Amino acid sequence: MRLGPLTGLVAVVLIAVAFGVGGDTPGVGDSGPQVKLFFQEHDTQQAVSLYLLVLAGVFLVFFAGSLRHHLSESDRHGWLPQVAFAGGILAAAGFWVASGVTLALLDASDEQQVSGPALQAMNAIGTDLFIPFVAGIGVMVLAAGLDTARRGTPLPRWLGWAGIALGVLMCIPWVGFFAFLVSGLWIIAASVLLARRPHVPDPARTPHMPTP
C-alpha cells in the first residue's frame, strides 16, 4: 500500500497530541488524595489522552510493518528488518499498557473503597511506565538505522546514521527520554521518504517476456 508508511506520521501526531492533552499528571511523591482529586477533575482530559495513545499504538504497528516491508526489499535475507518490526510492536504494547494504567486510575478515583495508598502506588507505576515504549522506539530506530546506513536504501544514509545515534542515546539514562522525543522527527522523515519512494517490482512476480 503506497500510503502505508504515512501511518508513522499519524502515530507521531497522535502521540504528541495525547501527551499534550494529558498535561502535567501527579508526580511520584504526590499523596493519594492529590492523585484522586486530579483524576476526578481531569477525567475527560485523561480519557481523551489515553484513547489517542491507544490509536497511536495501532498506527505504529502498521508503520512498523511497512518499515519492515521496505527494509526487506533491500535486505531479503537479513534479520535487522525483523528487529525493527519487533521494536515497533514493543513500543505499541508499551503505549497500550500505559493507557491501561491511566484507565485504571480513572476508574479507581471514582471508587470510595479504593484507598489513598493504592492510588499513590498506581500513580507511581504509571508515572515511570515509559521504559517499554521508549526502548521499543529505540530498538526500531536503531535497527532501521543500521540496515539503512549499511546499504543506503530504502532511506538515505544520513537518516540511517541519525537513527543509529538516536537508538544509542535512548539507551543512556536521563538522555534517553529526550532522544525519544527527537525520534518522532526521525519517524516523520522516514514516513514521508518511504511514501515518496518509487515502487520497486518484485523480480519473482514480474512476468518474463518470451524470447522471440
Image (spheres, grey):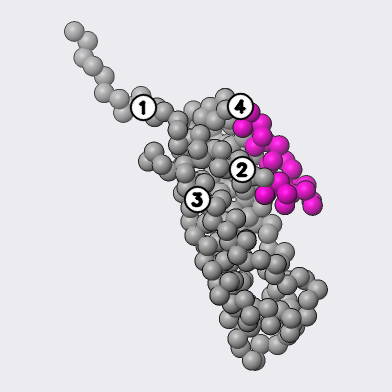
Instruction: Report the disc number at residue 157.
Output: 4
Q: Viewer-nearest of labels 3 and 1?
A: 3
* Structural distance between the alpha carbons of marks 3 and 1: 27 Å
Q: Which residues are magenta?
A: 157-181
Relative depth, front residue between 13 and 143 = 13
Marks 4 and 3, the one that precedes in the sequence: 3
Looking at the rendered structure, the secondary structure element under dot 2 is: helix
Name which residue type carries label 4: Arg
Marks 2 and 3, the one that precedes in the sequence: 3
Magenta highlight on residue 41: no
Q: Are marks 1 and 2 in contact (CB under 8 Å)?
A: no
The image shows residue 139, relative to residue 211, as above or below, that is below
The image shows residue 12, relative to residue 116, as above or below, that is above
Where does label 2 land, which residue? 185
Name which residue type carries label 1: Pro
Marks 2 and 4, the one that precedes in the sequence: 4
Q: Position of residue 190 (x, y in %)?
A: 54, 38
Looking at the rendered structure, the secondary structure element under dot 3 is: helix
* Structural distance between the alpha carbons of marks 2 and 3: 12 Å
Looking at the rendered structure, the secondary structure element under dot 4 is: helix
Marks 3 and 1, the one that precedes in the sequence: 3
Q: Residues within 10 Å of mark 2 (few under 14, many from 20)?
A: few
Instruction: Report the disc number at residue 201.
Output: 1
Q: Residue at x 68, y 78 (%)?
A: 38
* Structural distance between the alpha carbons of marks 4 and 3: 24 Å
